[in-house]
Structures are given as structure tokens and as C-alpha cells.
Amino acid sequence: MTQMTLDQQKIRAASDLHPTPEVNFVYGTAGFRMRADMLDSVLFKVGILAALRSYKLNGATIGVMITASHNPEEDNGAKLVDPRGEMLEQAWEVYATELANARDADSILKAVDSIVAQTGITFDKGANVIYGYDTRPSCASLVKALEDGLNAAGAKPTNFGLKSTPQLHYLVRCINTAGTNDAYGEPTEEGYYIKLSEAFKTLMKGKPTLSPITVDCANGVGAPKLADFLKYIDHDVWAANIVNDDINTKGKLNYNAGADYVKTQQKAPLGATLAPGERYCSFDGDADRLVYYYADEAGVFHLLDGDKIAGLAAMFIMDLVKSAGVDSINVGVVQTAYANGSSTQYLTKQCQVPVSCVNTGVKHLHHEAEKYDVGVYFEANGHGTVLFSPEALNTIKTTESKTPAQNTALKQLRALTELINQTVGDALSDMLMVEVILAHRNWTCQEWDQAYTDLPNRLVKVVVANRYIFKTTNAERTVVEPEGLQAELDAIVSKYNNGRSFVRASGTEDAVRVYAEAATRTETDYLAIAVAQLVYDRGGGIGSLPSI
Ligand SMILES: CC(=O)N[C@H]1[C@@H](OP(=O)(O)O)O[C@H](CO)[C@@H](O)[C@@H]1O
Ligand SMILES: [Mg+2]
């Protein structure tokens, strides 16, 4: 039944059951994320907010994903998903933060009223919210808090159960596009597997069978979901060994495993012994990030991160676009300042692909990627995807082939648009894309890695009294405050061959991040520590600094 207004009494009564602790909550880069035992009130309010967002959009289905991605098991979090499967519109992040910090029923109702007034919400079309959660033990009680919020605000809730983050994004888009020209797929988990597996099989047709890949699932939701996906693929076409698939033992989630661990530690996860010549990859805890790696003949570990995946994808798509005779489609790559300098050089100089650099955070990359016909975006940490514009999709769909070769290329391009999850970075879909490209190129990881050599790089965290005094511009590559800091930084950087360094306040941790790269490992370490020292001195550093 639809309603014309919110039931204030209901919200008041329910909010008494979810008291707000004295914590400053922020809807940040990745939604709300912190220790799970602090999040009960937050989830209750996320329920209210998701309902409001749906009312605002005339009953379009909104998603809520309960996860803390690669964070330790004791953390949890929540992110809202907009109707096309995208991240919540930025203006609403402010409302999320306001509501989360309203400490009693009166303040909650006041915050709700203010959101309703500011955004011009009407209630007559009702509200629909779907939600899913990862494998964390805290999810069960947080789901209850979320449901209380949804019910109090009069939304129709649908529990989709255990899901990877990208699966939830997929479902939201499918539900909202069902029955339109733009229908994204069957709004079920099975529909997701069918869409991906059919496209994958089309792309693998006639290509050499790859040796089985080993997939580290960080003991997270990716493990059962990948196992489910495998049921749709004939073992002779493609096979994967799943490691770190224990989602039931306490303390194992993300522990010394997963994409974030492999990227930051630059080593293989627990449970994977690298055999030279074989392929390995890691998902993160909610299966939206992916990195590859391998060992060379000498047993040395090599990482193929988001930058490498972006390069591989961009080159492949450019070639395919040419073979399909749709060269009018332009391909661009979007990176952040954390992209390795060698990757940017390779893309711009060697491949002649336009590259944009934007602020950290997937939403920034996603929006920039929408400006290209085909926008390939990846953070170095392995979160990313490829977006095809509606015009590009239309061209790919309607172009008629003149030769068998063109016909095959067009079919493959169409399948690629189905294989790639266009809503958000998706470890499973991205992995299948990489596997397809390696099969088409007949490449090993080592051959893929030959495109360029990463510059040695180092990421250092500096804890300071107040990280927000560090303000940046130029896609976070230039510091504007504290005044004069950039000049000092430049002076340091100029002493190193191929040196590059920048500093910015983290959006997810209470620290300033220092990134440095240079021609050699030693130079990189010295540069990183010198810049970290500068930040420490200017920012009133706390605790000890990492050493060389
Ligand atoms: C250097 C780095 O990896 N930063 C990460 C990290 O953001 P920070 O704002 O740097 O804390 O978490 C974000 C959310 O997961 C991710 O998008 C981003 O790439
Ligand atoms: Mg994640």
C-alpha cells in the first residue's frame, strides 16, 4: 500500500531501539565503514535513507550492500546503490552523514524532514529497496537494523541474501531496466551467471584452452559465488582452482589473503604456492577488486595490478574495434595519481590512448569513463571496469558486417559488452575478461607483463594531528595547503631519477598517504621516507615514521 507521508510515530519508536553512539560517522569513499559493533544505528538510518532515495526517484529500486570489503573481519559497513547500479549520487552522501549523526528520535525526524524538503520528495509512488550482504558474522544483526529502518520508513524491502558487491549492483540495474529497451539482464543471481557464462563461452570459442587458473578468494563471498559460476562452464572450456574459500572459520576473512593484501604486500597470499608459468589472481573480501600475479623461472613474484589490467583491456578493445570496422568508437583510459608512471607512459606514448587522471575513489573514475565511447577505468589496486556508452553499444549492435572476419569481431565485441559488468568493478567479470584476452593473444602472464616494467613504488601512511589540513588540487597531485609544502616537495623529488611523489589525506583511514616512485628501489625508498618526514614535520606527526 502506498502512503502520502512518513509515519513519524513508527520512526520514533524504531529509533529508540537503535541508539546512536558518540561517534562521528562519515559516508566516505566507500560508504560507512568501521568496527561492526558501532554500526547498528547507522544501518537503521541507512534503511531510512535508502527509502527516502527511492521515494525521491518515484519508487525506483535502490540497493544496500552490507560489507567492509577488504577490511578485517571485525569491521563492517554499508553502501547505497543508485537505480542504474551506480554508487549513490554524491549530493546524497551529505544527507547520509547528517542522518547518521542525528543522535535521538527528534534529531532523526528533523534530519528526515530536512532531506524531504531539500530534495522535494513525494511519497505517492512508494519505495523499493533490495539488499545483500557479505560473509561477515556481524551481517545478520546489521540486516535486522537495516530492515527496521526500511519498515519504519514504509519501504518495500527485499532480502537478496549473501551476494558479492557487484552482484548486488547488477541486480539493482536489472530490476530498474526490466521491460525496457535497455534491459540489463535477468534480475536473479542465476541470471548473472548465465549472462556472464554465455558471453564468456562465445568469446572463448575456437581459442586455445588455458591451463587452470588459481583464484584466491580471501575466504570471502567470492569463493561460493565463483564455485557457483563454475557450474555454468564446461571444465574443458575453462577451469579454476579456488583457494582461500573457507567462509566459516572465524578470523580468516581477508587474513593474509585477497587483492588488497597481495597489492600492498607485493607477495602471494597464504595458501598459494606459485609455480612458474601458471596464472594466479586474488579477489578482495566482497569480490569487487582483482589483481593477477605469477612467478618467473627464478621463482620471483610479479604483480599484474589494475594498471596492467587497464592496459591489457584497452589494447584488446582497440584492436577489436578496428577488426569490427567500428573505428569511430574512441577508447580512453581513466586512472588516478596512484597509477604507476610507466603505465601512463605506455598508454599515452606507445598505445596512443587518451588517459585522464582523476581523484581517488571509484565514483570519480566511473564518471570520467562515461565521457568516452569506451571508457576503461581501473584503480591501481584492481578496482575497475569498462563502460560502453549508449551510442557505442548501438553502433556495435547495428553495424552490419561485410566479411566473415568482421562478423566474428563484431560478435566478440557484442559478447564483451555482456561479459563486462558495466555497473561497477567486478572481480569475477574482470577475471573472465582477462582470461579471454590472454586466450585470444595466446599469452602467459609473463608475456602480458612485458608491455612495460613498473617503476618501483612505495606507499607510506603518516599519522598526523589533523589530516584535513592537507589540501590538494590537480587530481590530488599538487598540494595547495599547507602553503609552501609543494615547493619543498618538488625540491626533494628533483633529486631522484624519474622521481614522482604526492601526498593526500586518505578518505578511509585517519592518515596522510605518501606515494613515491623513482628509477630504482633504493631511490624510491629514500624519496618516500624524505617526503613522509616532510609531511610528519608540517602536520604535527604522531608516533613513529616508517624507516627505509
Ligand atoms: C591508495 C588507495 O589504494 N586508496 C584506496 C582507499 O582510499 P583512500 O582515500 O586512499 O583511503 O580506499 C578506497 C575505497 O576502497 C579506494 O577506492 C582507494 O583506491
Ligand atoms: Mg571491495
Image (cartoon, rainbow, N blue to C red):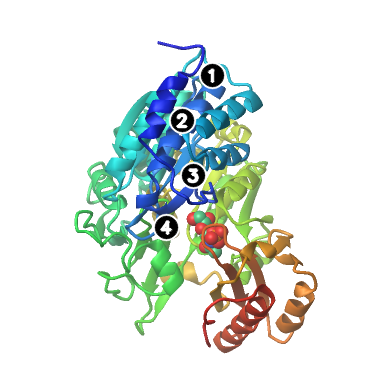
Circle 2/circle 4 CB separation < 8 Å: no
Q: Where's residue 239, x and y in %?
A: 26, 54
Nearer to the camera, 272 or 25: 25
Q: In this figure, which residue is indicated by the disc labeled 3?
A: 424
| Inter-mark Cα distance, 2 to 3 | 24 Å
- Estimate the x, y position of residue 353 in percent, counting from the top left: 66, 56
**361 or 112: nearer the eye?**
112
**Mark linked to residue 58:** 1
Task: Evaluate whether residue 199 shows in this view.
Answer: no
Q: CA distance from mark 3 to mark 4?
A: 12 Å
Near mark 1 (Cα within 10 A), the count class, few <14, some 14-19 or many ≥20, is some
Task: Looking at the image, tell me whether mark 3 or mark 1 is earlier in sequence order.
Answer: 1
Q: Secondary structure at mark 3?
A: loop
> What amino acid is at disc 1?
Asn
N-term-proximal mark, 2 vs 3? 2
Is the residue indicated by label 1 positioned so its CB lies within 8 Å of ligand 2?
A: no
Cα separation, mark 3 vs mark 1, equals 23 Å
Element assignment for label 2: helix
Can you say whether 303 is above or below 81 in the image? below
Residue at coordinates 63% horizontally, 70% vertically from top-left?
Answer: 341
Q: What amino acid is found at the position of numbered circle 3 in the picture?
A: Val
User: Is the residue marked 4 within 8 Å of ligand 2, measured from its CB?
Assistant: no
Residue located beneath label 2 in the image? 48
Nearest to viewer (mark 3 / mark 1): 1
